[in-house]
Image (spheres, grey):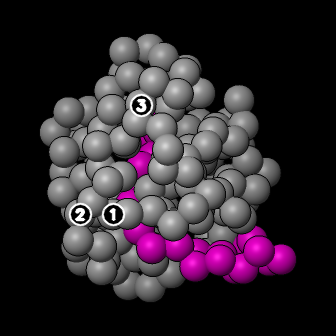
Amino acid sequence: MAGPRLKHAETEARALHREHGGVLLTGNNATVDAVRAAMAEAGTAHIAAHCVHKPRAPLFSALELADGPLFGHHIARLGRLPARVVLSACESALDLPRVFLDNGTRSIVASTLPVADERVSELVTDLHRRLALGADTASALAGAHPGLGFVVIGR
């Protein structure tokens, strides 16, 4: 899934879709309702988007999508969440992982730092390739390109 206003997000999402399949949501199709529906069916979700932080209120932190913000409270209301979520978004490890983990996601890959849009695609492509080969989330991230502030939260 690729949100708006990121130069490389759609290319990143399309490359991952070509390699791994699944539901591709980009441009005007990456709406709050479409992303929620796709997450409810996915084993792994990948979202490349701008992140808005509310550190003291993670239910009001959000990922920017085509029709507006996907808030933490939207995520919390899903009956089922993916087991693994990759947030290709600046500083997304600061607050949103708590919402995902509290509602059933087992592991989250997210960044503690601002992310250079053009540099993250290589990291997440390598990460997903390693996951597809059977690596656990932490090992896959450790073997990918370190140094961009990405961490694994959860198990």
Say which amino acid is labelled 1.
Asp
Name the mark on residue 144: 3
Furthest-top residue in this view: 134
Q: Are marks 3 and 1 in contact (CB under 8 Å)?
A: no
Furthest-front residue in this view: 147
**Front residue of 134 and 105:** 134
Residue 90 percent location from the top left of the image: 51, 66
Circle 2 crowding by C-alpha within 10 Å: few under 14, some 14–19, many from 20: some
Circle count: 3
Which residue is labeled 1 in the image? Answer: 117
- Splitting the image into 4 quarters, where does residue 66 fall? bottom left
Which residue is labeled 2 in the image? Answer: 8
Query: Which is nearer the N-term, disc 3 or disc 1?
Result: 1
Query: Which is nearer the N-term, disc 2 or disc 1?
Result: 2
**Residue 50 falls within the magenta-colored stretch:** yes
The residue at the point 66 percent across, 70 percent down is 72
**Considering the image in quadrants, where does the C terminus appear?**
top right
Q: Is residue 23 left or right of residue 110?
A: left
Residue 1 percent location from the top left of the image: 34, 58
Location of residue 52 with respect to 143 vertically, above or below: below
The magenta span reads 40-62
Q: Are marks 2 and 1 in contact (CB under 8 Å)?
A: yes
Q: Is residue 19 left or right of residue 44?
A: left
